[in-house]
């Protein structure tokens, strides 16, 4: 922390979001006690380690298209609205124990271990999906359902379904074979 008091207010947060690039905004100004809903309609990219170990609360990032490795590793994210997310790299939500249900209608790429130990209970993936990395859903003991709207023949996977999720997790290929 150094000599700066990093306790921030919502007004400060709103001001900084306007002048600092998205990946720097996340990395430089959020301390580990921010809670509530993190909303920003123009952020397109979340950089590596941006929210590592942070208490974030809800994510409402309607235009984010890319989340880099470890972006929310060991963070506390209790929900996420990411309707335009296309790529999520490896370990992006690793060890985030409270994620819950998530819907990623535009997702194309999910990296290895992207949601390992993330507290997922269900996940819905859109029809644009083309890749799921190894152990993408590993150690999510409460994960019951993976719904995939893409045709099975369109999706390349590293490893077998359910990609590290419990054997009781149901994988539904809603886009057919």
Image (tube, rainbow, N blue to C red):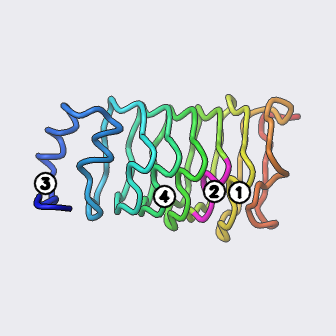
**Mark 2 or mark 4, whichever is nearer to me:** 4
Q: At which x and y percent is residue 70?
A: 50, 52
**What residue is pinned by disc 4?**
73
**In the rendering, which numbered label is found on residue 145?**
1
Q: Give the distance between the C-alpha atoms of the residues marked 2 and 4, in whole angstroms.
A: 19 Å
Report crowding for label 1: few under 14, some 14 to 19, many 20 or more residues within 10 A (C-alpha). many
Residues rendered magenta in the picture: 112-117
Report crowding for label 4: few under 14, some 14 to 19, many 20 or more residues within 10 A (C-alpha). many
**What residue is pinned by disc 2?**
122
Q: At which x and y percent is residue 73?
A: 48, 58
In percent of the image, x 73 and y 62: which residue is there?
Answer: 165
The picture quadrant where one finds residue 77 is: bottom left
In percent of the image, x 79 and y 55: which residue is there?
Answer: 162
Report crowding for label 3: few under 14, some 14 to 19, many 20 or more residues within 10 A (C-alpha). few
Q: Give the distance between the C-alpha atoms of the residues marked 4 and 3, in whole angstroms.
A: 24 Å
Label located before the other in sequence (3 or 2): 3
Residue 81's place in the image compared with 36, above or below, is: above
């Amino acid at each position: 922390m150094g000599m700066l008091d990093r306790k921030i207010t919502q007004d400060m947060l709103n001001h900084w979001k306007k002048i600092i690039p998205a990946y720097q905004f996340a990395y430089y100004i959020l301390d580990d006690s921010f809670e509530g809903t993190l909303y920003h309609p123009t952020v397109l990219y979340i950089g590596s380690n941006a929210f590592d170990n942070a208490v974030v609360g809800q994510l409402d990032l309607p235009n984010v298209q890319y989340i880099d490795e470890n972006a929310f590793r060991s963070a506390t994210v209790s929900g996420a609205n990411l309707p335009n997310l296309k790529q999520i790299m490896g370990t992006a939500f690793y060890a985030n124990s409270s994620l819950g249900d998530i819907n990623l209608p535009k997702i194309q790429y999910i990296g290895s271990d992207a949601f390992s130990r993330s507290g997922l209970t269900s996940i819905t993936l859109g029809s644009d999906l083309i890749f799921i990395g190894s152990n993408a859903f590993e150690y999510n003991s409460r994960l019951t359902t993976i719904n995939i709207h893409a045709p099975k023949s369109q999706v390349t996977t590293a490893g077998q379904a359910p990609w590290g999720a419990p054997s009781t997790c149901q994988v539904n290929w809603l886009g057919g074979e």
